[in-house]
Image: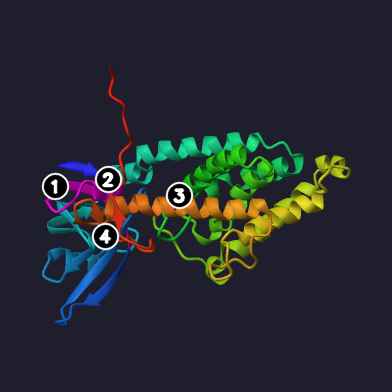
Amino acid sequence: MKHLTISSLRQNTGNIPASASFDAQLERRVERETKGGKPFLEIYLVDGTGEMKLKVWDNLPQFRALEEIADGTLLRFSGDWTQNQYGVDSGKWDMRLLTETEGAEFLAGDPETKARQDKDWADIERMLSEISDPRLERVCAEFVAQYSDRFRRSAAARKNHHARRGGLVEHVAQMMRAAEAMCSVYTTLNRDLLVAGVLFHDCGKMWENNYPEVGFSQPFTMHGEMLGHIPLGIEAVNKLWRDVMDQPCAESWAELEPATADIHLHLLHLIASHHGTHEWGSPTLPRTPEAMALHYIDNMDAKYEMMRMGYESSAEIAPGIQDRKFPLPASLVKPLPHFVAEET
């Protein structure tokens, strides 16, 4: 029997049952009723690669067993798994508690995901080190010094895209790489400002979409719910900016152009406007080339990740066509393979 992650389970299941096990943390359970009035549970399971929902019918022994299991418990699920438009399911499955050793291995994270996120973090540090403006370089360095651990365990969203531990690092690293590529095409873009804006645009999610030091269940917080990540990000950057301006290095910046106050204001504008519209939650609209570029880079990376997840999890409804993955606008079509020239 294969032992998989939640992400690889979705990739390896279809209409034909696949025998596999996977480990997960029980995030929560919801009691529901069928149209006939019979109770069942929907349990939400998470690991370092993603989440899934599983229905537990009242005629299964697991239905009663789950009454004794607390949210946050680490479990191993085994069965013959299929996937349809409602997600992964099984007609025959079982579960058990993880042993202490198994639990420690699970909480350490999937090695492949950890390696990818370590590389992404190294890329972020490299691109930040190449910022030439001393004001932006210093505030980014201060951010890394104060918040790197919290940043690296945050998600980029609660659902839809990069909604996993470390997802914010993946999202920001890919956006920074895209920003560097865009600056090579639109050469008047301020590369230093745009890269710093990418780092900070979602930094408020360290409070809105953060994970505890141990575990993969994303809690809700009062600050995240009552303020949201854009105001939280602006507040965090303002505090960092004040800290930096109190350092001795700031004394040499008085005569620099552009003015330090203008750098500060433009950086805050990138955070405030990155959703692009008032309807999507931005308190202001993009008013500079860097703000417009940041908005589209952010939107592109989020949509691309949604499509990648859709290809993993959406059921095939016709040859080459997969069911729509909310919030994408339409059904997914299998992408065209790369052309590979034949060797002569």
Q: Position of residue 193 (x, y in %)?
A: 68, 46
Find disc 4 in the rendering and name its residue. 323
Q: Earlier in the sequence, mark 1 or mark 2?
A: 2
What span is colored magenta in the figure? 6-27
Q: Is residue 120 left or right of residue 132?
A: left
The quarter of the image holding the N terminus is top left
Q: Earlier in the sequence, mark 4 or mark 2?
A: 2
Verify whether residue 182 appears in magenta: no
Q: Position of residue 5 (x, y in %)?
A: 28, 46
Mark 4 near mark 2, Cβ–Cβ under 8 Å? Answer: no
Q: Earlier in the sequence, mark 3 or mark 4?
A: 3
Find disc 2 in the rendering and name its residue. 8
Report helix, strand or loop for mark 1: strand
Front-most of residues 277 and 120: 277
Mark 3 surroundings: few (<14), some (14-19) or many (≥20) residues within 10 A: many
Q: Is residue 314 above or below residue 49?
A: below
Q: Spatial distance from mark 3 to mark 4, Cα to Cα?
A: 24 Å
**What is the number of the mark on residue 19?**
1
Verify whether residue 22 appears in magenta: yes
Residue under the point 75% across and 39% down: 134
